[in-house]
Image: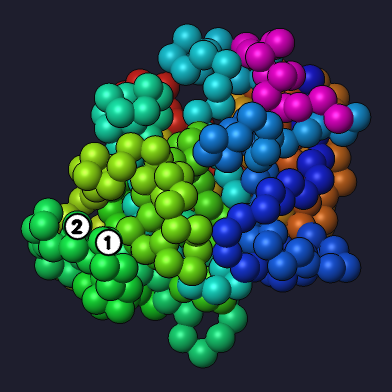
Amino acid sequence: MKPVLLEANQPERFYRGGAAIAELRGAVNAAEWGPEDWVASTTTLFGQHTAGLAALPGGELLRSAIEAAPEAWLGAEHVAEFGANPALLVKLLDAGQRLPVHCHPSDSFAASHLDCRFGKTEAWVVVGTTGADPVVYVGFREGVDEATVAAWVASQDTSTMLHALNEVPVKAGDTVFVPAGLPHAIGAGVFIVELQQPTDFSVLLEWTGFAEEGDSSVHLGLGFEAALGCVDRSGWAAKRLDGLVRHTADQRGPSVDLLGEQSLEFFRADRVHTESPVEFDPGFAVLVALEGSGGLSTQTGGSLELVRGNTVVLPHAAGSCRVDGDLVLVRCRPPIVGGSTS
């Protein structure tokens, strides 16, 4: 088992973007509707059979390879907890336009309404911005009652919905943890590495201009009366909101924890700086090279030369590994088994 260098995997989406992904990867052209690169994905788009799945060199789907040898890819402890599912989806997301106001269901909502163990808590690692005022929108500033949210959605009162959310300026190095249920939107010009639970469950509170009228996928086929039950309508004033946002741009060192303890039961993310060699313990991981060049070598003998824009999937059975050179990487990992460090 060796680390694998992955090609871009950009399924067509409902909003524009992709120029920042093309620039990072050194691609010549950016697809107008390619704003997301689903890195090492074993997850499909909602309602699709294969769209979104990542392929290994040679064409085999990563999902099929993991299902054939789950412990080699993921490790025995992970498989005992999550089966042959990495329990992680990583994306590069380049918002060429503001995304719609939307939210994602929790684990409990997904289990009861969608017959799925996973909801969709996510986190954003901001790696670049363009424009004069890059922002994201996160959580209602004040609590909102059920009838009000339903009325906003029914009338598609976009300006009121957007105004009700916290507008948060962002820059490269910032991270935002987005619990399931929290209404949110990503502003135009924000480029992120996104970690999330392995589903494509989204409830679009704002769908005008993003989906066809009558498209049932905007409410996950549940109808809005049921789907809006997953919305966190509580207020997120400044002090509470501060717990979701981190500013890490000036933090260096071999490995910078980007998300903290609140993310451990969902996923983990570190920014790795290789001014001196950095070693990792065995474990499934997805690596995104943001800057520089260097090398990755593993206990089993697998090695790769890495440059800015490379994305890599690292199997558990590759053993411990070492990264050196002059690289800046984001290392994305599945949740801690058991949901905590204890």
Answer with left or right where residue 2 lies relative to residue 224: right
Q: Is residue 292 above or below residue 188?
A: above
Answer with left or right where residue 11 lies relative to residue 95: right
Which quadrant: the N terminus? top right
Residue 14 x %, y %: 57, 59
- Whether residue 132 is visible: yes
The residue where tag 1 is placed is 153
Residue at horizontal 64%, vertical 29%? 49
Residue 52 x %, y %: 66, 40
Q: Is residue 308 above or below residue 164?
A: above
Q: Is residue 159 magenta?
A: no
Q: Are marks 2 and 1 in contact (CB under 8 Å)?
A: yes
User: Which residue is outermost to the front?
Assistant: 214
Residue at horizontal 27%, vertical 32%? 109
Which quadrant: the C terminus? top left
Residue situated in front as seen by the camera: 317 or 210: 210
The colour scheme of the drawn protein is: rainbow
Quarter-of-image position of residue 339: top left
Mark 2 burial class by Cα count in 10 Å: few <14, some 14-19, many 20+: some
Give, as a single range, the part of the protein colored magenta. Answer: 59-71
- Whether residue 297 is visible: no
Q: Is residue 290 above or below residue 298?
A: below
Residue situated in front as seen by the camera: 99 or 319: 99
- Does dot 2 land on a helix, a strand or a loop? helix
Residue 110 x %, y %: 33, 30
Residue at horizontal 27%, vertical 61%? 153
Q: Amino acid at mark 1?
A: Val
The residue where tag 2 is placed is 150
Residue at horizontal 28%, vertical 53%? 182
